[in-house]
Image (cartoon, grey):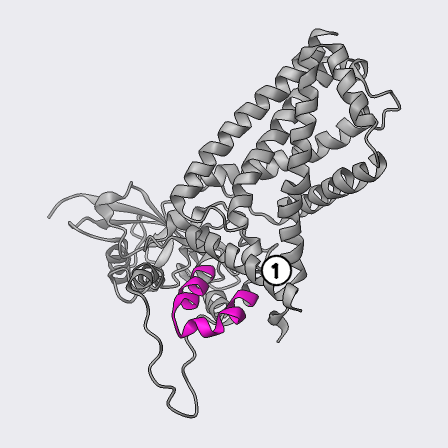
């Protein structure tokens, strides 16, 4: 076994309201490790770099293949998925922090409720429930399906929300991902039947107008979703809807 | 439903975006163009000013075409600058730096415009070539005019880049990149125009 060690500096927090503190860890190197593997190593042997016993570091993860979004944390200053953050590609010491745009539950675990509330607000779903069989929906053009599929890769990890300067305590901005989801469901042939509701939710409190085009979202999105394209496309749609509905009144 | 109503915030923000271009940007184009006549000499500039002074409905145009939109754009802009977060230290990507610059030049231009109105329009002096030479006579006046002009023009050019996105004109990343280069070209051209005019006044001090 190699004598190499991995040096981790982790920002921790015991409770929702308690103060944050940092703790350093040194763990034995194995080839092909990711950040999750390091956290598992700390869980197995919860001692800090001086060998003093401590509580294991808490984190969230599920799929370990960058499709669930649960392990988003700030790694060396950038919000990203811990599972796809490979140790061999990271500069040491590796600094782990929770994404503080969200309330911290404990250590690296954050509460993403605001993202699900945002998805509820913009009605990011296709309503198909009824009291009778609605029959098959209209078909989607292959040309649209191809780009819409890219938008459907969003797994609400929160990296875009964390990096956005306009998501802060002075605004109620729902975040870039929700705007992109409106574009996705407004493109879906059945979802389109409720497009006005979604556009109006984007004009509501914390809607699309809070975007200031810093374009950090598209830089940090782990799935490479064209968030800024979605925002610009929805800007056009929302403005057209606002003007058209005012003229019809 | 509550969110079926278009929020005031949305309308206020879109008004801010629209008024920034029509008429504030259009006004600044005319203003810089008028100033340029200073490079043709004192009499050329004074003739141009006299033409503007004799426009019909001038107080009406000044108030509704220039003063009110500028006031709204400026005051609401202060609110926008206040509610924005600033994380370019953490995420130093180009667009995020421009995001910060847009807000800093906006605040700076707001202060500059107040001073500029104070020393020209509301100074009590007759608006002519001599009035401007008096302003640029001091090193502070000269440099504040230069920096203020460059800041205003940057805010205009980069603001247009944002306007094209806020109104869904430049949608894709390539279109936004091309528009960014075009707008920075506009920034350089307008800066040169503004600075050349100021130097023409300064040369006559």
When the figure is inspected, residue B54 is found, relative to residue B36, above or below; the finding is below
In which image quadrant can residue A112 be found? bottom left
B131 or A109: nearer the eye? Answer: B131
Q: Chain of mark 1?
A: A
Q: Quadrant of the N terminus of chain B?
A: bottom right
Q: Does the magenta run of residues contain A180?
A: yes
A203 displayed left or right of A42:
right
For the point 47% across and 36% down, the residue is B180
Q: x, y percentage for residue A79? A: 39, 51
Q: Residues within 10 Å of mark 1 (few under 14, many from 20)?
A: few
Q: x, y percentage for residue B39? A: 67, 12
For the point 73% across and 7% down, the residue is B204
B118 or A36: nearer the eye? Answer: B118
Residue lying farthest to the top in this orientation: B204
**What range is drawn magenta here?**
A179-200
Q: How many numbered badges does the structure rendering display? A: 1
In which image quadrant can residue B52 be found? top right
A173 or B13: nearer the eye? Answer: B13
When the figure is inspected, residue A164 is found, relative to residue B188, above or below; the finding is below
B33 or B193: nearer the eye? Answer: B33
Residue lying farthest to the front in this orientation: B56
Q: x, y percentage for residue B35? A: 69, 21
Residue lying farthest to the left in this orientation: A1
Q: Quadrant of the C terminus of chain B?
A: top right
In which image quadrant can residue A61 be found? bottom left
Q: Circle 1 — which element?
A: helix
Q: Does the magenta run of residues contain A139?
A: no
Q: Main secondary structure of the magenta part?
A: helix
Residue lying farthest to the bottom in this orientation: A131
Q: Is residue A204 visible?
A: no
Pointer 1 residue: A243
Q: Is residue A194 visible?
A: yes
């Amino acid at each position: 076994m190699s004598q190499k060690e991995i040096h981790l500096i982790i920002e921790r927090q015991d409770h929702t309201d308690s103060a944050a503190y940092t703790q350093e860890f040194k763990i034995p190197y194995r080839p092909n490790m990711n950040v999750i593997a390091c956290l598992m190593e700390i869980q197995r042997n919860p001692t800090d770099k001086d060998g003093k016993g401590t509580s294991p570091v808490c984190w969230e993860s599920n799929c370990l293949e960058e499709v669930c979004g649960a392990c988003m944390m700030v790694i060396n200053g950038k919000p990203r998925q811990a599972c796809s953050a490979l140790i061999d590609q990271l500069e040491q010491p590796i600094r782990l922090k929770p994404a503080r745009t969200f309330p911290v539950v404990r250590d690296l675990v954050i509460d993403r409720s605001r993202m699900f509330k945002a998805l509820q607000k913009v009605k990011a779903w296709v309503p198909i429930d009824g009291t009778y069989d609605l029959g098959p929906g209209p078909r989607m053009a292959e040309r649209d399906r191809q780009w819409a599929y890219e938008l459907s890769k969003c797994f609400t990890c929160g990296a875009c929300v964390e990096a956005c300067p306009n998501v802060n305590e002075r605004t109620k901005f729902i975040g870039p991902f929700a705007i992109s989801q409106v574009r996705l469901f407004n493109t879906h042939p059945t979802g389109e039947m409720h497009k006005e509701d979604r556009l109006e939710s984007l004009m509501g409190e914390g809607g699309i107008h809070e975007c200031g085009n810093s374009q950090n979202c598209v830089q940090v999105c782990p799935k490479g979703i064209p968030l800024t394209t979605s925002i610009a496309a929805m800007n056009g749609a929302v403005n057209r809807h606002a003007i058209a509905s005012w003229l019809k009144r | 439903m509550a969110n079926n109503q278009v929020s005031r915030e949305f309308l206020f923000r879109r008004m801010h975006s629209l008024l920034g271009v029509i008429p504030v940007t259009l006004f600044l184009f005319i203003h810089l163009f008028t100033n340029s006549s200073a490079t043709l000499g004192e009499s050329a500039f004074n003739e141009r000013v006299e033409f503007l002074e004799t426009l019909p409905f001038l107080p009406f145009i000044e108030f509704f075409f220039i003063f009110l939109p500028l006031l709204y754009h400026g005051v609401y802009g202060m609110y926008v600058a206040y509610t924005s977060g600033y994380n370019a230290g953490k995420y130093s990507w180009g667009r995020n730096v421009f995001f910060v610059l847009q807000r800093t030049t906006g605040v700076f231009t707001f202060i500059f415009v107040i001073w500029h109105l104070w020393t020209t329009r509301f100074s009590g002096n007759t608006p002519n070539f001599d009035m401007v030479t008096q302003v640029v006579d001091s090193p502070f006046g000269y440099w504040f005019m230069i920096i203020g002009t460059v800041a205003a023009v940057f805010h205009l050019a980069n603001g247009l880049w944002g306007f094209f996105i806020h109104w869904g004109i430049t949608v894709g990343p390539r279109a936004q990149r091309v528009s960014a280069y075009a707008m920075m070209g506009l920034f350089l051209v307008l800066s040169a125009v503004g600075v050349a005019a100021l130097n023409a006044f300064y040369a006559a001090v």
